[in-house]
Amino acid sequence: MNIVSGIKKYATTDRLAVVCNDEKLSYSDLDRYSDIIANYISDKYEGNTPLAIYGNKDVMIIACMIGALKSKRAYVPMDVSFPEQRVMDVLDSVGPNIVFDISGKDFFYDENGQVKEEYRSYEIIDKNALMDLIARGQEGPLSNEVASENWVEGDENSYILFTSGSTGKPKGVQISAYNLDSFMRWMSPILGLDGNEKVVMDQPAYSFDLSVSQLYPGLANGATLYSLSKDVVADFKVLFEHMRESNMEVWVSTPSFVGMCLVDKEFNQDMLPKLRKMLYIGEVLPVEVARKLRERFPEVDIINGYGPTEATVGISHVVINDEHIGSDKSLPVGIPMPNCKIKIVGEDGNEVEKGQKGEIVIIGPSVSKGYYKNEEKTKEAFYLETSDPGLENESPIELADLRFRAYRTGDLGSIDETGNIRYAGRKDFQIKLNGYRIEIEDIENNLRKVENIRNAVVLPVYKNEKIAYLKAIVELELENDLGNLKNGIRIKKDLAKLIPDYMVPRNVTIIDKLPMNTNGKIDRKKLAEEL
């Protein structure tokens, strides 16, 4: 696997693999620590059940990830922003032997410091216990180098990333070693990662697929990941101090994050003099944001990209120029990667004429095998293409059928005269907010679980061609003497126990009865017009 091979290649140097707050981890230590972790897991547990990692940013999270890959196991990242119900849903789905808790919080523990009863079926290893394991394992059999035949390879899962699901339960997207190797070969030169020493910003949460864009190409090419934790990001004075100290050359984030940075005029090329690449995937890049970035960072390539989690982060890219910005159109999301075929299909499933809008279908080796232990949802979205897509088999092993894997994205778009994909929104109730993929129905189903709610609708509120926030419109079971504000505060507080914070609507409005259309369904169009 390319990422493990890359780490081993640079383990003989003095390069730093990860920097986070006051901690640093060299490639040499990353290689040794991950060997110890892998040997511990393999010695204690049979099979290849995935393991879970809970935390935000920490140098040891990377060691746990690589340790999983060296033990032929996928890892499942869970961010500290996940509420307890979402964590329990993920763990119930995966059933891991081990949960590495690198959060520094008491999430899995009671007031006596004991693991809570509901988590006792898993081995919980917190950071202190992990560091003790590393210290004990420096000598003896745990320190033995893990042979390459024991690494994750081919179509075996590297990670499983859980995304919002329309049923109210998250779906686990399986990404294999082959998927990732295909992605890295394409993304590394786009970011200018070529084996030379470079610093790459590591800001997106590891539970968010955008993070793979810097994590895998960065480590495979000997770069240093400069991690920005949630605490650092929350304080812009501290954040900008870290940025100035970082010497970063590569930036990866959502447009929303950089949009916040642009509010301060100090955020410019003088702050980041070595910066040369900025990549944006995960949500729409507004024209105005791109214009400001071009003005503030004249020496930097502003790269817009597109791709769903199910196709390994990204499958297209374009470097934004003045012509794109001045065209009076939304920005293109790029030319598809060479080993990927894009089809734009109509309601009948047939390809539409060039320039016409339809559903985006992705075919090729970046496409996932489907959702973990969820055959029904897998069959709805994935299929094998029957006609030869004309893609080369880049794999050294017999995985030719991966060229035929196809994913119906649910995204609407077209291919313009330049060959660029033009994104045109969703055909269902899935949206992107601050880079996070959210199923509107997921929020609505969980809202209906909140006490005294009969029904609910969630609507995206747009501003400057992108979704600014979510608004919930709620019908109560029983009227109460609380006003709209107090009801809204109570509902949001209860909802936050069921779904991550980023999915909780900013505004909640109570109405007597939700309007219905002639089909007997909630009239979302009318609500949106009134909104």
Image (tube, rainbow, N blue to C red):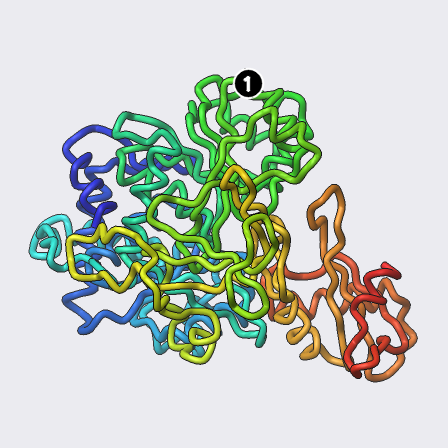
Q: Position of residue 132 (x, y in %)?
A: 25, 53
The structure residue drawn at horizontal position 53% and vertical position 61%, both measured from the top left corner, is: 345
Q: In which quarter of the image is residue 321?
A: top right
Q: Which residue lies furthest to the front in this view?
A: 353
Residue 205 against residue 373 in the figure, above or below: above
Viewer can see residue 67: yes
Left-right relation of 365 to 43: right
Q: Position of residue 451 (x, y in %)?
A: 73, 80
Left-right relation of 203 to 444: left
Left-right relation of 173 to 331: left
Residue 395 against residue 383 in the figure, above or below: above
Q: Mark 1 points at which residue?
A: 298
| Disc 1: CA contacts within 10 A as few (<14), some (14-19) or many (>=20) | few
Instruction: Give the camera-side residue of 276 and 200.
Output: 276
The structure residue drawn at horizontal position 64% and vertical position 66%, both measured from the top left corner, is: 429
The structure residue drawn at horizontal position 7% and vertical position 54%, both measured from the top left corner, is: 140
